[in-house]
Image (cartoon, grey):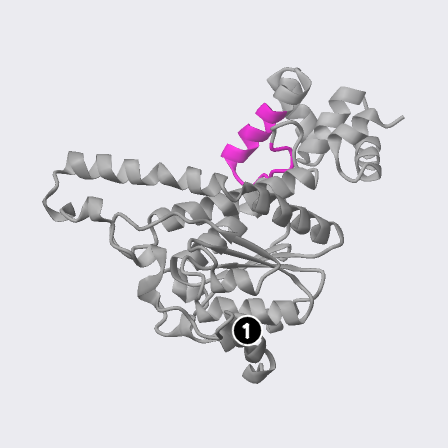
Amino acid sequence: MVDTFQFLPYSLETMTSTGKEPELGLLRTEQVDSKFQMLDVMTVSELLQAMNESDTEVPKAVSLVLPKIEKAIDGVVDRMLQGGRLIYMGAGTSGRLGVLDAAECGPTFSVSTDQVVAFIAGGDSALRNPVEGAEDKPELGAADLENANVSQLDVVVGIAASGRTPYVLGGLAYAKSVGALTIAISCNPNSEAGKISDHALDVDSGPELLAGSTRLKSGTAQKMVLNMISTISMVRLGKTFGNLMVDLQISNEKLQDRAVRIIEKATGVSKKESTEALQASGHEVKVAILMLLLNLDPTAARTRLHASSNRIREALTES
């Protein structure tokens, strides 16, 4: 069990210059947007138009923090190249978005389940049903990371629309104390989570159409940033060839078909030849591509790929 006082003073003392948390009602995500005060009397058509227009504000808000996201991604890639992990943590909608992004990295990029990890306040049962009070306990965030043996090689991404969720603050403070790289994703300027993190990604997505419902624009903004972090990190780690998903994990008929089409696109050969190469490669798309482009057998193609840090483009240009 984590001793709360080992990490909470760090978090609390550095949260703000005054040492006090801002009132929840003062946060941008909690404000009431006057444009939608008659929401309950709008027609369905009017509601759809209003919601769609509201959502267009999100990409604009994300664009303002792209330079900060770039620096955060550079940090993620650096740590993962050293064998570190990408670890998400959050509560409620934010936690579920982290779990979703982590879960998709396996089938999309063939990363192991312990390379990209996600924790949600209250545990896996909170994915479907809220766990009362779990997000209010910073010691639970710290305990989850301690139990996962978080170290200086890892990256911990705290996700909280408010930027002040105790579970996330406790986790970030613990991660910081063991030397992990810390990233905060919030939807409020100058967030508390950002103030205690190495990289503060505060996307000011503004008040929600439904006041305080941060599963809306805030959730969209957080998912956009998570998409950027995971996808671009994997591109930089050599998980793609051009914009082809060459490291996908073939686990069903749809992905089998996609793998064959990827090999066709990368090599220009027929579907039949692609299918045969995929089977001969042991269902490793990268190996199959090298076999066809360089006229290699599976063993030689695999050896060449490993010698090129599992990057197809490097393997193709290797002398």
Which quadrant would residue 315 be assigned to in this image? top right
Q: Residue furthest front?
A: 18
- Front-most of residues 113 and 8: 8
Is 259 included in the stretch rendered in magenta?
yes
Q: Residue at x 49, y 41 (%)?
A: 64
Determine the image quadrant of residue 147: bottom right
- x, y percent for residue 76: 65, 51
Q: Residue furthest right?
A: 319
Q: Nearer the viewer, residue 281 or 78?
A: 78
Residue projecting furthest to the left: 41
Residue 302 screen position, x and y as percent: 79, 35
The answer to which quarter of the image holds residue 151 is: bottom right
Identity of the residue drawn at 61% across and 43% down: 70
Q: Which residue is mark 1?
A: 11
33 to the left or right of 79? left
Q: Which residues are magenta?
A: 245-262
Q: Position of residue 127 (x, y in %)?
A: 40, 60
- Is 315 situated left or right of 175 in this image? right
The residue located at (35%, 55%) in the rendering is: 28
Relative to 287, is 39 above or below? below
**Residue 156 can be seen in this image:** yes
Circle 1 Cα neighbour tier, 10 Å, few/some/many (<14 / 14–19 / ≥20) = many
Dividing the image into 4 quarters, which one contains the N terminus?
A: bottom right
Left or right: residue 150 versus residue 305 is: left
Say what amino acid the circle numbered 1 marks: Ser
Secondary structure found at label 1: helix
* Quarter of the rendering occupied by the C terminus: top right
Say if the magenta span includes residue 225.
Answer: no
- Residue 95: x and y in percent read 45, 59
Q: Is residue 114 above or below residue 260?
A: below
Instruction: Name the foreground residue: 11 vs 2.
Output: 11
